[in-house]
Amino acid sequence: MQDFASATPAAAHMAEPGNQSGGYTNAAAGKNRYKALFVTAGDFSHINAQMLPALRSQCPNVDFETFNATEFMRSQQGTMMLCGLGALQEYGLSTLSSKAKLRYRLFRARSYFDRVGRMLRRRFGDAGFDFTVQTQSMFSAALPGVPNYVYTDHVARARLADEDQEGTGHPSSVWLDRERSIYDDADHVFTFGPKIRDFLLNDYGIADSKVSAIGAGASARPDCPVDISLARSERRNILFVGVDWERKGGPEMIEAFKELRTHLPDATLTIIGCSPDVQVEGVDVLGRLPLSELPDYFHKASCFCMPSRVEPFGIVFLEAMQFGLPVVSTTAGDIGAIVQDGRTGRLCAPRDAAGLAQALRDVLEVPETCKQMGLAGLERGRQFTWEAVARRIASHAPGAYGRPAAEALQW
């Protein structure tokens, strides 16, 4: 994959007033300061809270205004009722059979997509923004004549290849057409990993020159020096951090752990993020914890394991590497692009409890192996930061000249 940092940024086509790029005129050429709109869809797993400070630090000549489109829409009860009726028309009465199905289809219906777009254009169309950045691809934040940059970890067509974990069904063909327009109208689309980038190229027909896989950053970071001693590996403490127990492969984790204990009886498992009813010796279930408390558990662990059945990307794997932990997981989604099998951890097929047990044993049985994989992960994790992500996005935005080139990301 060509790293986009070495490609000519969009701003290079806009150096002089009147030059065209992506169907708009760079009215901001020659300005000392720029004005941008950062549009979000909910909290997005702590990502928005990390991205905005990173963008501001890497783009000191840009004044960012923020807008949470999902939060605003939820405050408009009448509009949301109309969106719900539209989802029923688009998907049918089965939409009402569960909360999960209603939620999934409501936010992937033409009625919601169109209303969010109209609202954003009415509210910000004449506000004089030089560019917009949106996280996720649930709607289009493109404003007339203003370049829009999309940063997303998933595309709807990727879900068509995944198993339907929550019984929500798949997005409608109508909504898939709307989703395609997000990428068609964007000046550049940034994905977390190469698999979603390839979906955009091969399944959506988006030009290679306007799609880049730029990685992500860690939300939980070390708050003190990382322990790289052999004694840490010898403790054989496995850490699992995930909210959705089933989708994150929790049942397979328990099966594999019980098998592992027949070979390594001193192994322990700490579960954070969810509260499954697990009555197994050596397992400690802690449930949900504040983000600020997670570093302590990463520091104490010997390895990280989350054997996801479905996973768009997996920021928690980046976090584990920041703490010098080898990662044991599956080949789902882009995990194989993050974790280098045999070097920074081990991978197995999704839902393969026996393979997972062997992968854990491969990492934990010999403490020196565990230590070396953790060190390799620590080194690899250095390129995955929110500051690096912000630099990669900024290299395409108006006003990019004079900024340091974004470093290449090695997949």
Image (cartoon, helix red, strand yellow):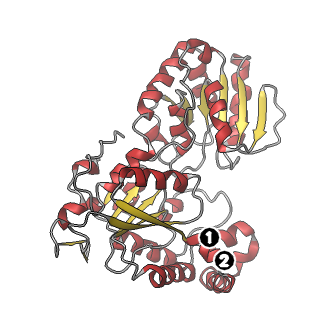
Q: In the picture provided, is 361 more to the left or to the right than 400? A: right
Q: Give the residue pinned by disc 1.
A: 71
Amino acid identity at mark 2: Ser
Amino acid identity at mark 1: Glu
Q: Are marks 2 and 1 in contact (CB under 8 Å)?
A: yes
Front-lying residue, 1 or 375:
375
Q: In the picture provided, is 343 more to the left or to the right than 128? A: right
| Quarter of image, res 19 | bottom left
Q: Give the residue pinned by disc 2.
A: 75
- Give the residue at the far front of this rendering: 32
> Badge 2: few (under 14), some or many (20 or more) residues near its Cα, within 10 Å?
few
Residue 284 x/y as whole percent: 78, 31
Quadrant of the image containing the C terminus: top left
Front-lying residue, 403 or 359:
403
Q: Does dot 2 land on a helix, a strand or a loop? A: loop
Residue 325 x/y as whole percent: 55, 27
Residue 405 is at least partly visible in this image: yes
Q: In the picture provided, is 3 more to the left or to the right than 42? A: left
Please say if 284 is above or below 46: above
User: How far apart in space, not on screen, are marks 2 and 1 (Cα)?
Assistant: 7 Å
Residue 213 is at least partly visible in this image: no
Please say if 226 is above or below 43: above
> Badge 1: few (under 14), some or many (20 or more) residues near its Cα, within 10 Å?
few
Front-lying residue, 380 or 358:
380
